[in-house]
Each structure stands twice: as structure tokens, then as C-alpha cells.
Amino acid sequence: MASDALVIVPTYNERENITAFLNKVLGLPYPLEILVVDDGSPDGTQDLVRQVMDQHPGRVHLLPRTAKMGLGTAYIAGFRWGLTRSYQYFFEIDADFSHNPEDLLRLLAACRDKSSDLAIGSRYVTGVNVVNWPMSRVMMSYFASRYVQFITGLPVHDATAGFKCYQRRVLERINLDKIRFIGYAFQIEMKFKAWKAGFQITEVPIIFTDRTLGQSKISKGIIKEAVWGVLMLRWNAFWGMRGAFNSKP
């Protein structure tokens, strides 16, 4: 029986983590399906995904792309893939175990049982719950969220969080063609537009643990995009966010 929930996992060179990650999600007591969106990893990530696909037909899917095109575009490709099917819940999660796959069920419960439209796995809603990050990076991430709140008014403690569950109606309402950003700013933009569209957002406290295998994909360009992207979101909101939303059915 097809699942109503799709876990979207962008990957680039995640050979060290992907098999264990997929098996962990598949072992959860809910029949989640997984879509791996891989940006042409040269390390054989796609081959490992296909091995798990053969072992679990119908539950693991692969959307291969030819080049590294950015986190935001990977998620949008995954959203579009899922929206052509019957899924009702869409997850964003990293493949490096910085997000605990067991928390997927807590985000799902927030949307399915508590009627949230967007559930965010939040590092900061109950303090600072981050493990293995240097203090400089913790402070940068924490104050980035405060900066987003100050500039935009977005009532979210963890504005750059990349661990989320969307109800289908949120992704159908946001005009994905108008999403501008690809890094942290993508995460902020999606939350901001969901909030501006009137959807209910819930933050679910999680513990974030920095990866132990593989390399981080963060760059100075991604940080710069987030800083200026927040100002652009506020400016566009001032002028009415023309074209940001699809018509309600």
C-alpha cells in the first residue's frame, strides 16, 4: 500500500551515511517513502541508493540530477515529484544524521494529529539544543534566526532549520516557480511564505547533532545569500509579494 508521507533527502557525496540513513528511516514504525535527490555525486551515492531500492521496492525512490545545483532546487524538484503523486505529508531532512530520523514521526504527529500545516524540527525553541558544533557556529546560527525575526517578523525561533514536515496544501499554495534562493535563504523563504499565506506553524524541539562522517556543504556564498535574502523577503513583502502564491482551489 502506498504511503501518504514522502521523506525528501538531497544528497551530494553522502556515501558514508546514505545506506545507514535509508535503513533507519525504513525501520521506523510508519510506512514512510523516501525520495533521494542526488546532484550527480561522484562518490557512488546513487549506486548505494539503488541497492536499497532493490531491497525495498516501492519505498525508496531516486531522482538523479547531473550536477550540483543547490539545496533549494533539490527540494523543489522533490516537491514537484511528490505533488504529481498522492502524498499528503512532505519532509525535509539531511542524510548525515544531524537530524535524528526518529524525530520524523514527531513532526508527522504535529501535522497529522495536531493539525499544523508546517512542523519545524527546532534547535532553539527550548534553548540551544546543538551537539558537536563549535561555539562560533552555534552563535552564528542562533543569531541568524534572531536576525530573521527582527527583519521579517517571522514568529519562528529556528528560521534556518532544514528539518520540516509540510502538509500538501502548503506546497500547493506556495508558487514554487517564484522561490528565489538555494541555501539557508531557501529555508527562510519557505517558512516566511508559509506564514504569510496564513498557515499554522509549529516548532517541535529536537536535538541537532553535527555530522561525524562526510563533509559539510556550507559555504560563504550560502551565508551571504541568507543575509541579503532576508532583506529581499522583507522588501518584497512590503510590496505585496506579487505572484508568491497560487490561487486557492
Image (tube, rainbow, N blue to C red):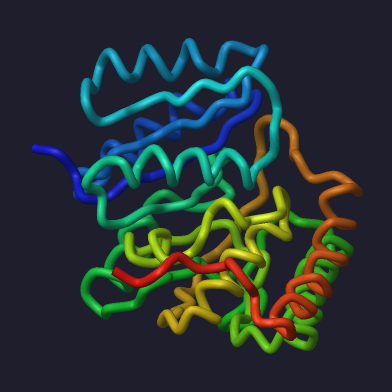
Q: Could you say where residue 129 lies in the image, as x and y percent from the top left? A: 62, 70
27 w.r.t. 41: above or below? below
Q: Is residue 226 above or below residue 50?
A: below
Residue 229's x, y, as percent?
A: 80, 65
In-image side of 154 versus 8 (left or right): right
Residue at image coords 63%, 56%: 179
Q: Residue at x 53, y 54 (%)?
A: 176
Q: Quadrant of the C terminus?
A: bottom left
Image-quadrant location for residue 247: bottom left
Q: Nearer the viewer, residue 212 or 221?
A: 221
Location of residue 1 in the rendering, given as x and y in whole percent from the top left corner = 8, 37
- Vertically, is 129 above or below 22? below
Residue drawn at x 37%, y 65% as measured from the top left:
107
- Judged left or right of residue 216, residue 246 is left
Q: Nearer the viewer, residue 94 or 171?
A: 171
**Percent of width and height locating residue 211:** 65, 43
How many numbered badges does the structure rendering display? 0
> Residue 58's image quarter?
top left
- Of residues 196 and 52, the one nearer the viewer is 196
> Residue 70, relative to residue 225: is it above or below?
above
Q: Quadrant of residue 50?
A: top left
For the point 74% across and 75% down, the residue is: 236
Left or right: residue 202 versus residue 190 is left
